[in-house]
Amino acid sequence: MARTKDFDEAEILKKAIALFWDKGYNGTSMQDLVDGLGISRSSLYDTFGDKHQLYIKALDTYQKNYGGQLCTLIRESQTAEMAIHDLLAMVVNDLLADKQQRGCFMVNAGIELANHDTEVNQLICQTQNQLEDTFLSVIERGQASGEISPNKNPLALARFLNNTVKGLQVSAKSSTDRAFFDDIVETALTVLV
């Protein structure tokens, strides 16, 4: 008869995200995971597989949660310009609220592993494509409504804004100056007109 799990997998994944985000993949040992997650090594292996499988699951969970927040924000914004502003402001607010200055979990994973880990690279690319597609749909909506210049290449704008987000996420690891981030957001918005 199979044993029932005496822990919440979603809660364990939240803890795993925090551990990997703090220490990185290579800096997190199996013992760190056992201690930090509060489950036995055998439960960890039985439920999530090895460290790499847990890391991939943590990245995927993070991406789905954060991506869902972005999509909700875009849908609820009244105008395209407001949607882009609110998305960039949300990114800045989230980054500045993190007193540990960890940056973005997904960007950190990309920097640490994407060039030699195919699965991580695929998740990073999916995340980047999702954000680019989100920006593209908002920009096209803004061009149709006249808010955003129809003379601008919507894909180029989406890529620029996507790269701006990544730049903000990396900069947050060394700066907490709100004016610095606000200047970047305000300047990024000027490319829309």
Image (spheres, grey):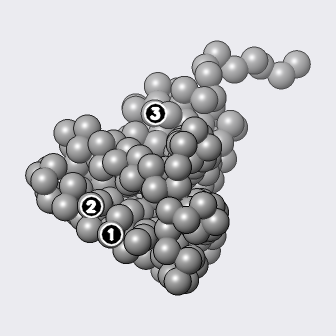
Q: Residue furthest front?
A: 146
Residue 15: mark in rendering: 3
Q: Which residue is painted at 54% across and 43% down in the image?
A: 78
**Image quadrant where residue 129 sits:** bottom right
Residue 11 sits above or below residue 24 on the image = above
Disc 1: CA contacts within 10 A as few (<14), some (14-19) or many (>=20): few
Q: Secondary structure at mark 1?
A: helix
**Image quadrant where residue 7 sits:** top right
Q: Secondary structure at mark 3?
A: helix
Residue 41 horizontal side relative to residue 192, left or right: right
Name the one closer to the observer, 150 or 93.
Answer: 150
Residue 33: mark in rendering: none
Q: Which residue is mark 2?
A: 186
Q: CA distance from mark 1 to mark 3?
A: 39 Å
Disc 3: CA contacts within 10 A as few (<14), some (14-19) or many (>=20): some
**Image quadrant where residue 131 sits:** bottom right
Q: Which residue is mark 1?
A: 190
Q: Residue furthest right?
A: 1
Image quarter where the C terminus lies is bottom left
The mark that comes first in sequence, 2 or 3, is: 3
* Amino acid type, mark 3: Lys
Q: Which residue is painted at 64% across and 16% down in the image?
A: 6
Q: Position of residue 167 (x, y in %)?
A: 31, 68
Q: CA distance from mark 2 to mark 1?
A: 7 Å
Residue 96 horizontal side relative to residue 192, left or right: left
Disc 2: CA contacts within 10 A as few (<14), some (14-19) or many (>=20): few
Q: Which residue is painted at 88% across and 19% down in the image?
A: 1
Q: Position of residue 66 (x, y in %)?
A: 52, 45
* Amino acid type, mark 1: Thr
Name the one closer to the observer, 100 or 73.
Answer: 73
Number of numbered discs overlaid on the protein picture: 3
Q: CA distance from mark 2 to mark 3?
A: 35 Å
